[in-house]
Image (cartoon, grey):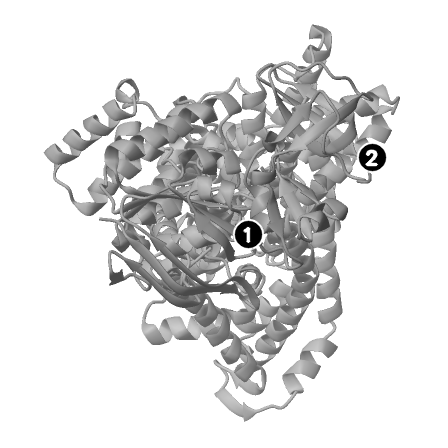
Amino acid sequence: MGRITLKQVTKSFGDVEVIPPLDLEINDGEFVVFVGPSGCGKSTLLRLIAGLEDTSGGTIEIDGKDATGLPPAKRSLAMVFQSYALYPHMTVRKNIAFPMRMAGVDKAEQKRRIENAASVLNLTDYLDRRPGQLSGGQRQRVAIGRAIVREPAAFLFDEPLSNLDAALRVGMRMEISELHTRLKTTMVYVTHDQVEAMTMADKIVVLRAGHIEQVGSPLDLYREPRNLFVAGFIGSPKMNLLQGSEAEKRGAVTMGIRPEHITVSATEAAWRGTVGVSEHLGSDTFFLVNLEGYPDPITVRADGEVSLHPGDTIHLIPDESRIHRFDAQGLRIP
Amino acid sequence: MARAVSNNRKLLNTVIAWTIGILIFFPILWTILTSFKTEAQAIADPPVFLFFDWTLENYEVVQERSNYARFLWNSIIIAGVSTILGLIIAIPAAWSMAFVPSKRTKDILLWMLSTKMLPAVGVLYPIYLIFIELGILDTRIGLIVVVMLINLPIIVWMLYTYFKEIPGEILEASRMDGASLKDEILYVLAPMAVPGIASTLLLNFILAWNEAFWTLNLTAAKAAPLTAFIASYSSPEGLFFAKLSAASTMAIAPILILGWFSQKQLVRGLTFGAVK
Amino acid sequence: MATQQSRSAARMMLAPAVVLLLAWMLVPLIMTLWFSFRKFLPLRGGDLGFAGFDNYTRFISSSAFWPSVQTTLIIVGGVLLITIVLGVILALLLDQPMWGQGVVRILVIAPFFVMPTVSALVWKNMFMDPVNGLFAHLWKFFGAEPIQWLSQESLTSIVMIVSWQWLPFATLILLTAVQSLDSEQLEAAEMDGAPYLKRFWYIVLPHLSRAITIVLLIQTIFLLSIFAEIFVTTGGAFGTKTLTYLIFQRVLESQNVGLGSAGGVYAIILANIVAIFLMRIVGKNLDT
């Protein structure tokens, strides 16, 4: 129970159209991630679904029923905010109980659900503390707890991890994924971090300037980016994009190849260049290589520890089967 | 990080600050002391400071002459009810300006404040006529309404500045959690803004308590609060210093005591929420 | 950040306050305007018909008008100057480390709680009385002739009394602002070799500018309409008749409502001139 359908949804602030007509289908139980650079309209889109903003046009359906005009409270959606938005004057227990109190759930049932959520989220020992006494990760879990107990049709997450430090973020990412596996409830998750998108999503929606650039599974987007924007946005480090003779040779205006699809060769190979900066991570090594005839360096990934130094000549073999070709409009050539 | 300061320097600061503090407080202290003197001691030259025959007779005389309790009760009712009424009207208004701002919000706020600048005396007679027409001259109801209206802009402004410090996401979260507008204000906003609301309440209670234009001009006997009580001592009888002091002490004591107990909120309130 | 629903709710919630204040402003204002064009003497025949601009010309040409405007401006300006200058000094002093800071703060704030009628009476009688007042005793002690405060130095006396009432407020706001000053800034300036006065002038004072505007605004609002202090002390005699007081006399003492109302309109115009000027400043400050 948690199918969300957007039909020709638009949003304007004054004369500025932030979301041009947009269609999207979110299936029951799916983990959908909206990803895009800041200002792409992803948070606005989430707030439209939540009912915190009005649509300027189009309809939003939740489980087949028109919810466009419904206030947030009536949409049976729960939201986790970037700042967690916990009620500072209430204990953790009261925070989690709040939505149930508003819905008039009876006391015994409230208690059961609170305890259940607390044990799932490791909050049992903190139920009588106030948000101010908790760490960032704990606050995040309280916010999630508050969302779970409502048993909503879908969860909405608005950049929930951006206020956490890097180590915690990885942990919380896993926890949210686990939660999804356990609850099997629809989740809509907004982030600007493509790593979060790739690791968590069943379905990624890449947005730019309010437009959906591509919708698909993480691997779909990785393997077959529909255009240059998606190609450049998904994947880390970024895909190398080359124009000129190498692209023309392959019948494209721009060709793209990911750093991991280039092999370093000991002998003379297809490409030759000089090593610029190199980053040794132990498990991988990344080189910036200045290809002959190209002004901008490309990134190359090599397995393990490779000892090459700035200024060394390097030979590279691009994996021809993993080359992406784009036309003059930046669209993928199949 | 406060820097370590030598004790000598600190001592000097302390002496200067206490001297100035006591000088500023002195008129109040002197009034309180004089209220316990006899009339002769009150005007003695050189003045007597602490060593006199402490007496309560002035308080008895003042109480006999005018019914202090009635004035006090009027003051409490007028200041209290007008402030609470003001809060009830101002909280929703401040909520709306702080959390659903529009292009006109700032103009409305400034306009409200500018109504405070309307010289009361310019509209005294019309108000006087309206009061007679409505039969509320010299009634507490009438004064409550007027005092509430003159303080309303300040209440709205103070609450607005306090509310603006509360992140809107928390209110949105409550909306997502199914809270109605009433629930949102009652269970989320108001408890979070308690310090601000308390400061606003206290400061406006004091402003209402001390309001001396309308309370002097729109009351005669029945609804007169302490401002009128004390104004009646401006006649030559005021020359009885000890009795004047007793009456003054009685008029200001409730507020001084209130101020003493709620120092923290008051200090915050006194800045009108405008300076952090 | 809002939906149609919350916006319409917002309008509903704002409405009572706006409607009440609008009524509070407009109804008496319109009545005042109406009276100002009538010859209206409640005790001597009541409404005697249309008077044209008669009241306006009479009020402005009366010998008391310009002095009253002058008196108003002197009192407002004098009190503002004294409270702001002393307020800054006191705020800087109270910010220094000392023992019993809380108690000193209470002592300094106390005058604000004293109702204007009380403070006027206490000052008038117990301090400024030329025979039995404390000042008279003090002057005599030093062998000087006691000053007839409220008749010879009437305006100074009133400015003194009102300043005493408002100094706490100015001090407190400025103190709050001083305390929010980043001490690293000052330390950096000290490292740069700036002497104390320069540090005050280039760092402390600019930092206080917002607080000073707030003091200016709020005090002006209240000072323009001071009434009780004059009512109780001089009753408007000895050159202490402010515009407010002059109108009060016309309306209530001479029972000439038409004339008084014309004066009221002048007072409203004066207040609006001040208001426009102040609102500009505050409007700017509200943005930050």
Please determine if labels 1 and 2 lie on a single subunit. Answer: no
A7 is higher (above) or lower (below) than B196: below
Chain of the residue under the numbered disc 1 shown in the image: A
* Point 67% across, 24% down: residue: A264
Gap between marks 1 and 2 measured at Cα: 46 Å
Rendered location of residue A15, percent (x, y) = 57, 68
| Residue holding disc 2 | C201
For residue C202, above or below residue C149: above
Query: Residue B75: percent from the left, percent from the top?
Result: 37, 48
Q: Where does label 1 land, which residue?
A: A40
| Numbered tag placed on residue A141 in the rendering | none
Residues B127 and A143: in front is: A143
Lateral position of residue B213 relative to residue C283, left or right: left
- Nearest to the observer: residue C50 or residue B177: B177
- Residue B11 lies in what quarter of the image? top right
Locate residue A86, reporting x and y percent: 37, 35
Mark 1 touching mark 2, by CB under 8 A?
no
Q: Chain of mark 2?
A: C
* A62 or C195: nearer the viewer: A62
Q: Amino acid at mark 2?
A: Trp
The residue sitting at 82% across, 35% down in the picture is C202
The kind of secondary structure element at disc 2 is: helix
State the count of labels: 2
Side of A57 where C75 appears, left or right: right
Can residue C45 be seen here? The reply is yes
Q: Nearer the viewer, residue C9 or A30?
A: A30
> Please, is residue C174 above or below residue A66 in the view?
above
